[in-house]
Amino acid sequence: MNRVHLKPRHGLVVRHPLTGAVLPATGETVEVDGYWRRRLVAGDVYAGRPTPARKSTKPRKKPTEDNHT
């Protein structure tokens, strides 16, 4: 079977048929079966690209050295 990254249309809540979990707005890569084909045809979901993980914009803290006295 094909794997595709699907995202819900804006404002819709789409549940995963096996887990019952809500499909996140960022989408999820799923095995395309009859359920997902019906969601695609109905326009409830669309194929999209996975959102790349963002790199932290916080500066890294340098490790502090122990005070040697």
Image (cartoon, rainbow, N blue to C red):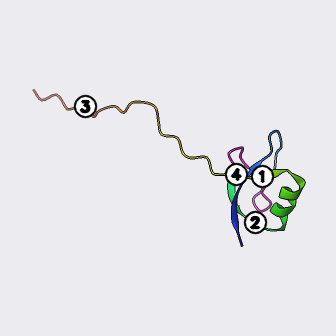
Q: Is residue 69 left or right of residue 40?
A: left
Choose the circle earlier in sequence order: 3 or 2: 2
**What's the distance in space between the residues labelled 4 and 2, CA to CA?**
13 Å
Q: Quadrant of the N terminus?
A: bottom right
Neighbourhood count class around disc 4 (C-alpha, 10 Å): few under 14, some 14–19, many 20 upward: some
- Disc 1/disc 3 C-alpha distance (Å): 48 Å
Task: Spot the residue most to the right.
Answer: 42
Q: Is residue 6 left or right of residue 61?
A: right
The C terminus: image quadrant:
top left
Residue occupied by mark 1: 46
Q: CA distance from mark 4 to mark 3?
A: 44 Å
Residue 48, position as x, y percentages in the image: 70, 51
Q: Are marks 4 and 3 in contact (CB under 8 Å)?
A: no
Distance, label 4 to label 1, CA atoms, is 6 Å
Q: Which residue is mark 3?
A: 64
Q: Say which element carries label 3.
A: loop
Pointers 1 and 2 in contact (C-beta within 8 Å)? no
Q: Which residues are magenta?
A: 16-27
- Cβ–Cβ below 8 Å for labels 4 and 1? yes
Q: Nearer the viewer, residue 48 or 59?
A: 48
Question: Which residue is disc 2 drawn over?
Answer: 32
Q: What residue sits right under mark 4 in the picture?
A: 48
User: Residue 17 lies in magenta, yes or no?
Assistant: yes
Residue sitting at x 86%, y 51% = 43
Kind of residue at disc 3: Thr
Q: Is residue 28 visible?
A: yes
Residue 10 location in percent, x, y?
80, 40
